[in-house]
Image (cartoon, rainbow, N blue to C red):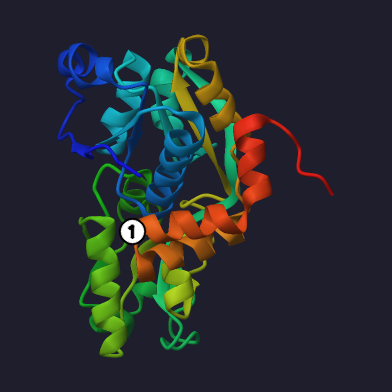
Amino acid sequence: MKHRMLKTLTGAVAGATMMTGAAAAQDVTIGWTAWSDAEFVTKLSRTIMEDRMDLEVELVQTDIAPQYQGVADGDIDAMLMSWLPATHSDYMDQVGDDVVNLGILYTGAKLGWAVPAYIPEDQLSSIEDLKKEGVRDKLEGKIQGIDPGAGLMRLSNKVIDEDYNLDYNLISASGAAMTAALDRAVNRDEWIVVTAWSPHWLFGAYEMRYLEDPKGTLGGPERVHAIARQGFYQDQPDAAAFLARMSIPIDDLQAAMYDANENGYDTAVDNYIKANEGRVNYWVTGDMPSS
């Protein structure tokens, strides 16, 4: 299968370039941020639309804020990583009237701070425990974060500065840098707290647990939605219907993400399609699988 080049945008989406250049030559443009769940779902949708629906798909990688703005402005057709009702509520408050919600991709998503299971639970089981002097020393006063534009980072700053008043530095990095830091710590049996979310392959790779969040700052169960620009359904009814029908059980998604981490996303996507032919056919055609 011939994949299109992944384009990385920094800052705001370059509207004029997208509208008059690459986007005009493509059938469907999907935005994504380099989070493991978003990467798998987005590349899965591209493969199916190119192989089964004879569509050309361009993936545009950018930070989450310009991604929402790109959909609202019509520079991006769709994005498959809208965390609602809480995590991305501020973004949706800004662009909600200018985008269309195509439906839920998966449920049971969660944000939190997580630690390796070898850290004694009687010493660190809650965010409140981070105030203990001995705990802070072992963590060197750091919480390992992800990209600064993520809703999880916004909420994590609120945890530190407002709701829990913690004397910690939140380290901004990519999702890949976060998992690399976790891997180093686990290999050395060191203490670490990472900003985490489910689904994520790290929960299949390591024994982890979430810290309790008694004040609920990091939120409760979330649903991840596909959203599209206004007019997308009219311009691309088959693609819009496909994305509206696409839905994955979170356990299946997490297993596929672990496969992607071990074997690469292209292999994991192919494996998922082969193992779920009936489900994929429903997404494409709308025909329910026979029992």
Q: Mark 1 = which residue?
A: 165
Seen at 26% across and 84% down, the residue is 138
Does 227 sit above or below residue 139? above
Count of picture labels: 1
Residue 168 in view of the camera:
no
Estimate the x, y position of residue 199 in percent, counting from the top left. 50, 58
Residue type indicated by callout 1: Asn
Residue 259 in view of the camera:
yes
Q: Is residue 169 left or right of residue 240?
A: left
- Asked which quadrant contains residue 85, the reply is top right
Estimate the x, y position of residue 181 in percent, counting from the top left. 24, 72
Q: Nearer the viewer, residue 9 or 287?
A: 287
- Asked which quadrant contains residue 131, the reply is bottom left
Estimate the x, y position of residue 201 in percent, counting from the top left. 43, 66
Estimate the x, y position of residue 89 in percent, counting from the top left. 46, 32
Does 261 sit above or below residue 183? above
Q: Quadrant of the N terminus?
A: top left
Q: Secondary structure at mark 1?
A: loop
Question: Label 1: how many residues lie within 10 Å, few (<14), some (14-19) or many (20+)?
Answer: few
Q: Is residue 8 left or right of residue 246?
A: left
